[in-house]
Image (cartoon, rainbow, N blue to C red):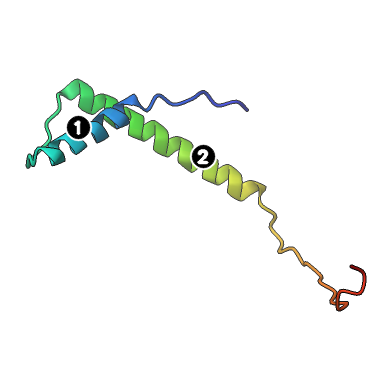
């Protein structure tokens, strides 16, 4: 199942905004409701995708532990 890429520009813009505020020693970051909604939706999509990927990984992993057998021969067959 092919998953379409996530547009993370809202997250990137927020990170840039926080970095700029920090660089200018501003005590707060403000954003309009449209930017806040875009950030909220993007974070929701990212977290949902992450949770789905984690669930797929856990379902695919073998339920039994693998046994690996190692024989020590002193390196005589090198």
Check disc 2 and report its element: helix, strand or loop: helix
Q: Residue furthest right?
A: 77
Q: Are marks 1 and 2 in contact (CB under 8 Å)?
A: no
Q: Nearer the viewer, residue 16 or 69?
A: 16
Residue 4: image x %, image y %?
Answer: 52, 23
Crowd around label 1: few <14 · some 14–19 · many ≥20 (10 Å): some
User: Which numbered dot is residue 17?
Assistant: 1
Indicate the position of residue 74 as horizontal and vertical percent values. Answer: 86, 78
Quadrant in the rendering for residue 71: bottom right
Q: Position of residue 46 (x, y in %)?
A: 41, 35
Q: Please give the label number shown on residue 52.
A: 2
Q: Residue at x 91, y 74 (%)?
A: 76
> If you read the primary sequence from the N terminus, does the residue marked by circle 1 or circle 2 appear first?
1
At 37% from the left and 28% from the top, the residue drawn is: 8
Quarter of image, res 48: top left
Label count reads 2
Quadrant housing the N terminus: top right
Between residues 1 and 14, which one lies in front from this camera angle?
14
Residue occupying image coordinates x 7% and y 42%: 27
Could you say whether the residue bearing mark 1 is in a helix, strand or loop? helix
Instruction: Measure the alpha-carbon separation of dots 1 and 2.
Output: 29 Å
Q: Residue at x 78, y 67 (%)?
A: 68
> Quick check: 52 left or right of 35?
right
Q: Quadrant of the C terminus?
A: bottom right
Is 34 on the left-hand or right-hand side of 61? left
Q: Quadrant of residue 72?
A: bottom right
Residue 24 in the figure: left or right of residue 11: left
């Amino acid at each position: 199942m092919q998953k379409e890429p996530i547009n993370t520009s809202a997250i990137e813009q927020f990170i840039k905004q926080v970095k700029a505020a920090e660089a200018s020693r501003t005590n707060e970051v403000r954003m309009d409701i449209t930017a806040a909604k875009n950030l909220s939706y993007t974070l929701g999509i990212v977290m949902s995708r992450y949770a789905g990927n984690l669930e797929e990984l856990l379902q695919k992993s073998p339920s039994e532990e693998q046994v690996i057998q190692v024989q020590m021969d002193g390196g005589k067959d090198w």
